[in-house]
């Protein structure tokens, strides 16, 4: 479809200029066609950008030709002003199109057509005659009558070509193409429309058109057309045609209003499709759906009955899975405790003897140092009575060289610090032995819970010391009958979890007390807290919120099992971003024997 036609009437006689004019008209036609068929934003923006770039190139070429030929300065300025006007207009269009694709309107295309025709046939024609014949452009006059006739001839030719292409397309497409006037009377219908409505190939009357529509659908169709005319709106509609032989044809139709430049309603134009086969398929599908629904209901009843039979087996399997998980948890915990015990035994055995040597040697070394210092003191007293001046000078110089006064005090401090360090190592070894119950039997006994907490703190000190400050708020606790090594395992799990919950620095608080016949221990942290949706799952075996490879999900499950074994409780209070508190409640007298 072409809005502009190139022909010999537009040829100016300068080959390069004529070639560029023809390309500009081609680009304008491309833009008009892209807008007409509803091309995407990217395509239209690309055409607009190309049109601007080529226009600037063309104008620069004409300007160079005029400059080289010493073209009339006044006419040159007029020529240049027209060029700048067009470029400025297109630059505005370029910005508008990038924001809104609908900025390219009919008025814009009219402007481009008028500008191109008038510029080529007037300003450019004067330039060409001047450059070819050597005539002053100011002396050249254009026949306005001939100018107008050429424009009208080209516009009429473009209109006829557009109309011809539309009719060719409409007549060869398998769809109903039609146009009505403001009174809803058809003024154009394609061949397929006449064939579908079973009417002779002539403009039908309103009565012929309505009579072809099924009586039950006529009011719906006419009301739809009237509403579209009143509201200037598009519509979609499905209706039936009734043939003389009683045959039903289903039509799916879309239409849009035609509006004149003055805003008045000019009619409708639309497109329709024969969807009879689709409607028949929908009817068959509906029947099949009914049959399928009945079959589904039947199968559903059978499945419900089967599910009821399987429900009991499912419950039994769930119970068995729970028992297996508990057994696996206890097995893993047993292996873990055995490994800890074995490790502690090895560490205690390997370190205990060397530490004994070190303690003994430090004690002997302190005695030797004390004797040596006493001897030095005696020598210092004899210096006052000595008459050997040279020897006294040497002794005094050596004492200054080794800084004897500092050495006498510092060597005792070093011995004291070494002895203190060895004592601390010995204490850690004892805590390892206590924690791994190497010196106790795995049975119920009266235990000081504070001692267990302190022992466990020493064991996990390396996990905590760089991240958390320990605050102790111990109450008065009697001894509690329990399995101490297992409670130490609970304390260790809770303390390590508290340390892991603190990302940078925080506080871990230990509290103890009694209530009724029970003792309680609280371990609180200022970490990131536990989300509400996870709090009901934290004691489940293998559940963990830690990243993959960072936790087994068994620590709290094992702790829960141990506390339940003591017939106690383990309670949780946690808020995201504020921290977590675990409270352990234990009967002071221990669990009832048969349940334990």
Image: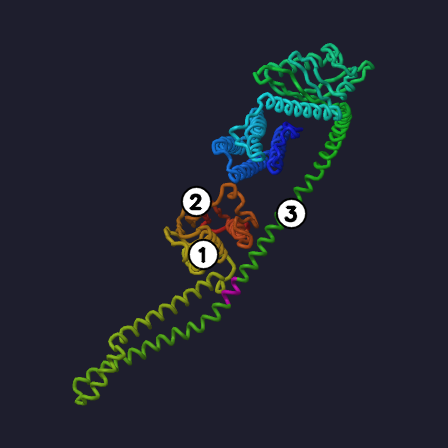
Instruction: Give the mark, 2 or 1, whose residue is nearer the N terminus.
Output: 1
Q: Nearer the viewer, mark 2 or mark 1?
A: 2
User: Where's residue 333, x and y in %?
Assistant: 55, 56
- Dot label at residue 285: none
User: Where's residue 32, x and y in %?
Assistant: 62, 29
Q: Is 502 located above or below residue 160 in the figure?
A: below
Instruction: Give the mark, 3 or 1, whose residue is nearer the N terminus.
Output: 3
Disc 3 marks which residue? 320
Instruction: Give the mark, 3 or 2, whose residue is nearer the N terminus.
Output: 3
Q: Nearer the viewer, mark 3 or mark 1?
A: 3
Image mark count = 3
Q: Is 55 located above or below residue 401 in the figure?
A: above
Q: Quadrant of residue 118?
A: top right
Report the span colored magenta: 340-345
Secondary structure mostly taken by the magenta-highlighted segment of the chain: helix
Decide if residue 215 is on the left or right side of residue 84. Answer: right
**Viewer-proximal residue, 316 or 178?**
178
- Dot label at residue 446: 1
SS label for mark 1: strand
Q: Nearer the viewer, mark 3 or mark 2?
A: 2
Decide if residue 481 is on the left or right side of residue 274. Answer: left
Could one spot residue 105 in this view of the protein?
no
Which residue: 66% across, 21% down?
255
- Please check the rendered image and state whether residue 343 is part of the magenta-colored stretch, yes or no: yes
User: Where's residue 425, x and y in %?
Assistant: 41, 67
Disc 2 marks which residue? 577
Residue at the outermost top position:
207
Residue at the outermost right position:
245
Q: Give the crowd class for mark 2: few <14, some 14-19, many >=20 residues within 10 Å.
A: few
SS label for mark 2: loop
**Viewer-proximal residue, 506 or 44?**
44
């Amino acid at each position: 479809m072409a809005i502009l036609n190139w022909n010999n009437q537009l040829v100016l006689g300068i080959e390069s200029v004529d070639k560029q004019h023809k390309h500009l008209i081609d680009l304008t036609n491309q833009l008009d066609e892209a807008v007409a068929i509803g091309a995407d934003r990217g395509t239209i923006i690309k055409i607009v950008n190309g049109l601007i770039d080529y226009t600037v190139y063309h104008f620069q070429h004409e300007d160079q030709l005029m400059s080289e030929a010493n073209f009339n300065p006044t006419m040159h300025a007029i020529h240049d002003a027209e060029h700048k006007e067009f470029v400025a207009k297109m630059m505005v269009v370029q910005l508008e199109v990038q924001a809104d694709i609908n900025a390219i309107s009919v008025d814009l295309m009219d402007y481009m057509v008028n500008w191109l025709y008038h510029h080529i046939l007037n300003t450019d024609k004067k330039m060409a005659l001047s450059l070819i014949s050597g005539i002053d452009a100011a002396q050249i006059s254009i026949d306005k009558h001939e100018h107008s006739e050429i424009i009208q001839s080209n516009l009429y030719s473009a209109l006829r070509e557009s109309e011809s292409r539309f009719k060719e397309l409409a007549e060869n497409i398998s769809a109903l193409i039609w146009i009505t006037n403001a009174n809803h009377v058809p003024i154009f219908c394609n061949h397929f429309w006449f064939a579908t409505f079973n009417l002779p190939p002539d403009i039908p009357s309103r009565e012929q058109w309505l009579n072809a529509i099924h009586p039950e659908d006529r009011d719906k169709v006419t009301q739809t057309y009237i509403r579209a005319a009143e509201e200037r709106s598009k519509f979609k509609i499905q209706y039936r045609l009734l043939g003389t032989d009683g045959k039903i044809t289903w039509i799916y139709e879309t239409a849009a209003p035609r509006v004149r430049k003055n805003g008045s309603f000019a009619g409708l134009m639309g497109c329709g499709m024969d969807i009879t086969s689709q409607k028949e398929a929908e009817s068959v599908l509906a029947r099949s759906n009914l049959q399928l629904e009945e079959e589904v209901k039947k199968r559903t009843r059978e499945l419900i009955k089967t599910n009821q039979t399987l429900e009991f087996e499912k419950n039994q399997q769930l119970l068995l899975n729970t028992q297996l998980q508990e057994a696996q948890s206890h097995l893993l915990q047993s292996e873990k405790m055995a490994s800890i015990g074995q490790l502690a035994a090895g560490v205690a055995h390997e370190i205990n003897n060397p530490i004994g040597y070190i303690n003994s040697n430090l004690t002997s070394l302190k005695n030797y140092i004390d004797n040596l210092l006493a001897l030095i003191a005696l020598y210092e007293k004899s210096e006052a009575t000595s008459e050997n001046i040279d020897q006294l000078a040497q002794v005094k110089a050596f004492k200054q060289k080794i800084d004897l006064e500092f050495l006498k005090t510092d060597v005792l401090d070093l011995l004291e610090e070494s002895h203190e360090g060895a004592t601390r190592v010995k204490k850690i070894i004892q805590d390892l032995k206590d924690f791994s119950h190497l010196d106790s039997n795995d049975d119920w006994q009266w235990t000081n819970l504070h001692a267990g907490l302190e022992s466990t703190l020493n064991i996990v000190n390396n996990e905590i010391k760089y991240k958390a400050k320990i605050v102790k708020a111990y109450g008065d606790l009697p001894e509690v009958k329990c399995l101490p090594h297992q409670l130490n395992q609970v304390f260790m799990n809770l303390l390590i979890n508290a340390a892991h919950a603190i990302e940078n620095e925080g506080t871990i608080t230990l509290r103890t007390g009694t209530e009724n016949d029970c003792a309680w221990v609280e371990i609180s942290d200022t970490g990131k807290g536990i989300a509400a949706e996870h709090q009901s799952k934290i004691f489940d075996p293998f559940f963990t919120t830690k990243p993959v490879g960072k936790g087994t999900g068994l620590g709290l499950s094992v702790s829960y099992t141990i506390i339940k074994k003591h017939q106690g409780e383990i309670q949780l209070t946690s808020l995201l971003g504020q921290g977590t508190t675990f409270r352990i409640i234990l009967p002071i007298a221990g669990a009832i024997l048969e349940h334990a």
